[in-house]
Amino acid sequence: MNDAIPVKKAVITGPTGAVGVALINELISNDIEVTAVCRRGSKRMDAIPRDSKVRIVECNLDELWSLPEMLGVKDGEGDYDAFYHFAWDGTYGETRQDTALQTKNIEYTIDAVHAANKLGCKVFIGAGSQSEYGHVDGVLHPDTPCNPDNGYGIAKLAASRMSRIECEKLGIRQEWCRIVSLYGPYDGEYTMVMSNIIKMCNGENPKCTKGEQVWDYIYSKDAARAFRLVAERGTHGAIYLLGTGQTKLLKDYIYAIRDAVEEITGIHTEPEIGAIPYYPNQAMHLEADISNLTKDVDFMPKHSFDTGIRETIGWYINHR
């Protein structure tokens, strides 16, 4: 199951977020056809790139088991190569602790595996999270023991391991990519990066914590390239951390956003560092070891934070 796979046709669930949109652009630029699976009536459907290689299908998470039928594919007769499962209910706020909701996500992930099998996919790639580790004081490695402390992280970890078991039964290669911290166009407005961009572009001095957290932010375009390479050349059962392998203090990211906003818009703001306390159980270290990602698929990030943040600010200004 570790042979290289020439990907010509892929499915993506949850395609309207920062990584989903970036991945669609990455795939179509490499002449790969994409079926983008959206929630019915999604307000973010307009984010999906319009291209002759992109097909949009409306399908809720609890309908994933019927996706092959929706696509007109009979069991085992599909000609798809890769299945990316990004869709997930309850990704932020109090919904992360909604155990009933999070448990459903595990079931939906297994439904996605079976849909991938019926579509003829040879590889299944899941989007994991640093939340699977819980609190770790130091660098996160693929084999760092996991001790998640919220329902979201627990469900992601269970989905990772159960989907691997199910893929092995079906002869499908499986990889799980844990996103440490990501930013880019189409990111949610509640994230640290996007919320600060919005406030600063509107002339507001954002209130921040002391910003002593040591974090590793990857640009969505780099993450998308990693996802493509993992589908093509990844190792079955591997855990890959999506990051740059380089870190900054969170306050330094905030100052970089401030400087870029001022350079692009002429608006000067001053972040109020230390104005608000850390969240309860604040994660102070989000540092990624990407060595197996580099070794297995020859991935290295191409975008610096300064480059990525300017592109993201430009996107926000053009879309607000």
Image: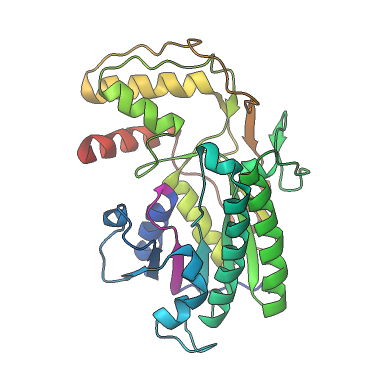
Q: What range of the chain is rendered magenta?
A: 9-18
- Where residue 134 sits: x, y (%)? 70, 37
- Between 302 and 122, the residue placed more toward the observer is 122
- Where residue 3 sits: x, y (%)? 64, 74
In the picture, measured across the screen, residue 211 lies left or right of residue 176, that is left
> Which residue lies at the image location 37% right of the left edge and 36% below the top edge?
189
Number of marks in the image?
Answer: 0
Quadrant in the rendering for residue 296:
bottom right
> Which residue lies at the image location 49% right of the left edge and 49% below the top edge?
223
In the picture, measured across the screen, residue 125 lies left or right of residue 254, that is right
From this view, report whether residue 23 is shown above or below residue 153: below
Residue 14 painted magenta: yes
Residue 290 can be seen, yes or no: no
> Which residue lies at the image location 60% right of the left edge and 38% below the top edge?
245
- Where residue 64 sits: x, y (%)? 49, 70
The C terminus - image quarter: top left
Residue 314 painted magenta: no
The N terminus - image quarter: bottom right
- Where residue 150 sits: x, y (%)? 66, 40
> Which residue lies at the image location 44% right of the left edge and 58% below the top edge?
14
- Between 269 and 139, the residue placed more toward the observer is 269
Quadrant in the rendering for residue 127:
bottom right
